[in-house]
Image: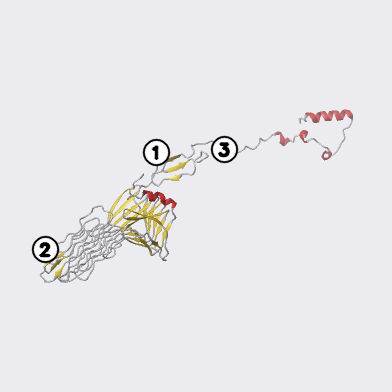
């Protein structure tokens, strides 16, 4: 039964009693909207739409929590924002990520890297570690923040892409990046002949050759890590020694000078030492090779000069990041020794961009060959001996020793393929954290 509103019922009764009820069309009657009859659908009254209500705080603004390598920070509304990955895992406090603690005192520069622009160097780029000038392959100056820390020029960037880059100067080279570093070309701090690479030593640790009568004894090669070859033996005289061996130094050593040749007192210079290169990323490092270019880090030693100069030793390369990956055929890191100069007009070869030893200078007769430079798996060889009695003779310089390659990642491992080139004394370990 439909119930009418009380006011309407009373009005109808009064109208009936007075005999004033008329049959008027429904749309002609004036009906108080308040007392209008309810439609059947209106019997079920819907509640008002719910008003938005702020979510109850679940955390204290400004705090953070870290678990399963993910960091979540509490915002001003007391809610956790989107999680952020921790490349080195969660700190033991459970409130932050571990941060990379870089080698050689550049933590402040690494912390500042997030505030710097990205760096991209094109093929043919050059870096001068003394002046800090950087030029791209087209000759244009590239503005990059840098500072000298302990004889190393430290460049600071948000991220970095490196194609073919030649580095020169007395300081070694360090690049620190908050984001990923991608190496697409050859970044070289290698020696060229007797000229040392960036940060490489100008003084060899091989012993000088010396003249004995008309028999001339040439100096052995110096090595940054690993013994260089000795100079050849002349007659019954003692050999000149090679480098003193691995000392975990931070720069390469140049090769020893050749002995004075004949009565002219000319001097054959030893090969230059490979330089110093450090790449540090708070995210990751990729060394990539494809049809366009081959990513390679090069700190090879230089070849000894003709007339018996010792080969230069390889330098030092440090690569540190939460992860390191080698991609493509030929990508890698080399720190090979240079070949020793022959006791003739043949100089030794600079260290190779492969696992092949640099060849010593090749001679004939009473003037002997220089020794080959070292690689990661093959030791440097001595300059060839001469046991004849020629009035004038000479022996070749020894090959340069291998350099050192240090790799530091989160787990001490890296990803490589069968065609990856790694040549030098390799030491891999855990990245330091702070």
Of tags 2 and 3, which is closer to the observer? 2
Image quadrant holding the C terminus, namely top left
Q: x, y percentage for residue 264?
A: 17, 71
In space, the residues marked 2 and 1 are separated at their CA atoms by 66 Å
Question: Mark on residue 154?
Answer: none
Image quadrant holding the N terminus, namely top right
Q: Nearer the viewer, residue 152 or 8?
A: 152
Q: Which residue corresponds to mark 3? A: 54
Residue 44, above or below 173: above
Q: Residues within 10 Å of mark 1 (few under 14, many from 20)?
A: few
- Label 3 sits on a secondary structure element that is loop
In space, the residues marked 2 and 3 are separated at their CA atoms by 92 Å
Q: Nearer the viewer, residue 287 or 148?
A: 148
For the point 23% across and 52% down, which residue is it? Answer: 247
Q: Which of marks 3 and 2 precedes in the sequence? A: 3
Q: Which of marks 3 and 1 precedes in the sequence? A: 3
In space, the residues marked 1 and 3 are separated at their CA atoms by 31 Å
Q: Which residue corresponds to mark 1? A: 93
Q: Which of marks 1 and 2 precedes in the sequence? A: 1
- Label 1 sits on a secondary structure element that is loop
Q: Nearer the viewer, residue 413 or 132?
A: 132
For the point 44% across and 39% down, which residue is it? Answer: 65
Q: x, y percentage for residue 62?
A: 47, 40
Q: x, y percentage for residue 403?
A: 27, 57
Q: Which residue corresponds to mark 2? A: 237
């Amino acid at each position: 039964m439909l119930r009418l509103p009380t006011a309407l019922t009373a009005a109808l009764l009064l109208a009936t009693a007075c005999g004033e009820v008329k049959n008027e069309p429904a749309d002609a009657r004036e009906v108080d909207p308040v007392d209008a009859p309810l439609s059947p659908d209106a019997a079920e009254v819907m509640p008002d739409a719910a008003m938005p209500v702020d979510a109850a705080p679940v955390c204290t603004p400004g705090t953070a929590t870290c678990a399963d390598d993910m960091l979540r920070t509490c915002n001003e509304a007391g809610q956790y924002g989107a999680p952020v990955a921790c490349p080195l895992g969660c700190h033991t406090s459970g409130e932050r990520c571990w941060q990379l603690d870089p080698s050689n005192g550049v933590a402040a520069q690494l912390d500042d890297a997030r505030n710097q622009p990205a760096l991209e160097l094109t093929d043919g780029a050059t870096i001068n570690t003394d002046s800090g000038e950087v030029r791209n392959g087209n000759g244009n100056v590239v503005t990059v923040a840098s500072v000298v820390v302990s004889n190393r020029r430290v460049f600071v960037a948000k991220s970095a892409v490196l194609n073919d880059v030649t580095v020169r100067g007395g300081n070694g080279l360090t690049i620190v990046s908050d984001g990923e570093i991608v190496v697409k070309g050859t970044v070289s701090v290698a020696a060229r002949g007797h000229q040392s690479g960036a940060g490489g030593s100008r003084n060899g640790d091989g012993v000088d050759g010396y003249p004995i009568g008309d028999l001339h004894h040439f100096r052995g090669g110096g090595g940054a890590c690993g013994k260089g070859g000795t100079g050849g033996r002349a007659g019954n005289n003692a050999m000149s020694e090679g480098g003193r061996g691995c000392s975990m130094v931070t720069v390469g050593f140049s090769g020893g000078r050749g002995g004075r040749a004949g009565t002219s007192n000319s001097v054959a210079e030893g090969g230059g030492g490979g330089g110093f290169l450090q790449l540090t990323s708070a995210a990751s490092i990729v060394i990539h090779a494809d049809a366009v270019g081959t990513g390679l880090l090069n700190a090879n030693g230089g070849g000894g000069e003709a007339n018996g100069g010792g080969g230069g030793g390889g330098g030092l390369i440090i690569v540190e990041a939460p992860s390191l990956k080698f991609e493509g055929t030929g990508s890698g890191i080399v720190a090979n020794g240079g070949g020793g100069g022959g006791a003739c007009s043949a100089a030794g070869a600079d260290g190779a961009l492969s696992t092949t030893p640099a060849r010593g200078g090749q001679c004939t007769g009473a003037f002997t060959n220089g020794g080959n430079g070292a690689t990661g798996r093959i030791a440097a060889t001595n300059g060839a001996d001469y046991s004849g009695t020629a009035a004038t003779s000479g022996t070749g310089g020894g090959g340069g020793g291998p350099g050192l390659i240090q790799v530091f990642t989160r787990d001490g491992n890296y990803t490589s393929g069968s065609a990856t080139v790694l040549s030098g004394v390799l030491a891999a370990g855990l990245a330091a954290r702070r």
